[in-house]
Image: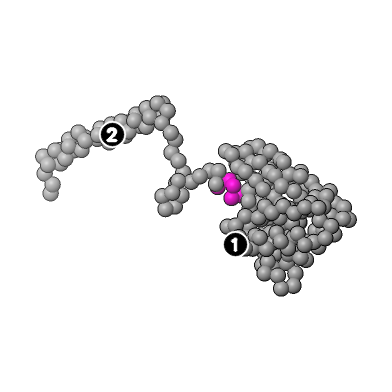
Amino acid sequence: MYGTGSFSKTVRARASRSWVLPLLFAFALGIVGSATAMGAPPPRQVAPGGNLVNPEASLGKKVRNRLASIPYYNVFDNLEYQVQGTTVTLSGQVLFPLSASSVEDCVKGIPGVTRIVNHVQNLQESPFDNQVRWAEYRTLFFGDSPLLRYSLGVTPQIHIVVNNGHVTLVGVVASQMDRELAYLRARTVPFVFSVRNDLKVG
């Protein structure tokens, strides 16, 4: 049988401590509230592993994946982008059936994109430019060419942009030697007005 004295002491002790937790909670709320009112920065999202998430990098990855998955995007097209905040700037050149407007429409559906600046150029088709495109493609990649691997996959690593007989090589190669080799091969195609080498090594 429990004694009434010990029970009453326990009740009084618990009652005396009952205000402590609400007071601490209110105090904590006051600190958070005052920090917010004083302009303290809001919490930043942290990725697993403790690294801070870069919103622009995250959005840029979504844009890159969306552009790479556009139907009909191939070796004769080139698309580039920049992300500043929630604004995406598109640039490059595309050949029918792609168009600047269709590329913009693909990016519009990405969550987080609020503004698009579209500098994509629609390349004009002509029999002459088409001949140059395929001649460049064969010269760069056919036969025993060491550059063949850059033409493989859904999205080739070397893109051949032809505009009114002028050729621009765009993309990423593994070495400076491959970069120079691609340029030298591209220059051997007859009737080409100029060749510009914008390939990067990475």
Most common SS among magenta residues: helix
Q: Residue at x 60, y 60 (%)?
A: 176
Residue 61 lies in the magenta stretch: yes
Residue 115, horizontal then vertical, whole percent: 65, 37
Residue 48 as seen in the image, left or right of residue 113: left
Residue displayed at 79% across by 46% down: 122
- Foreground disc of the pair 1, 2: 1
Question: Mark 2: which secondary structure?
Answer: helix
Q: Position of residue 6 (x, y in %)?
A: 12, 42
For disc 2, the marked residue is: 24
Quote the CA–CA distance across marks 1 and 2: 63 Å
Residue that label 1 marks: 175
Residue ranking furthest to the bottom: 144
Residue drawn at point x = 44 percent, y = 52 percent: 48
**Picture quarter containing residue 22?**
top left
Name which residue type carries label 2.
Leu
Q: What segment carries the magenta color?
A: 58-62
Q: Residues within 10 Å of mark 1 (few under 14, many from 20)?
A: few
Badge 1 or badge 2: first in the primary sequence: 2
Residue type at mark 1? Ser
Judge the density around disc 2: few (<14), some (14-19), many (≥20) Cα neighbours within 10 Å: few
Residue 100 in the magenta stretch? The answer is: no
In-front residue for pair 163/77: 163
**Would residue 118 be found to the left or right of residue 131 on screen?**
left
Q: Position of residue 19 (x, y in %)?
A: 25, 32
The structure residue drawn at horizontal position 64% and vertical position 63%, both measured from the top left corner, is 178
Q: Which residue is farthest right?
A: 127
* Nearer to me, 115 or 194: 194
* Residue 70 visible to an observer of this rendering: no
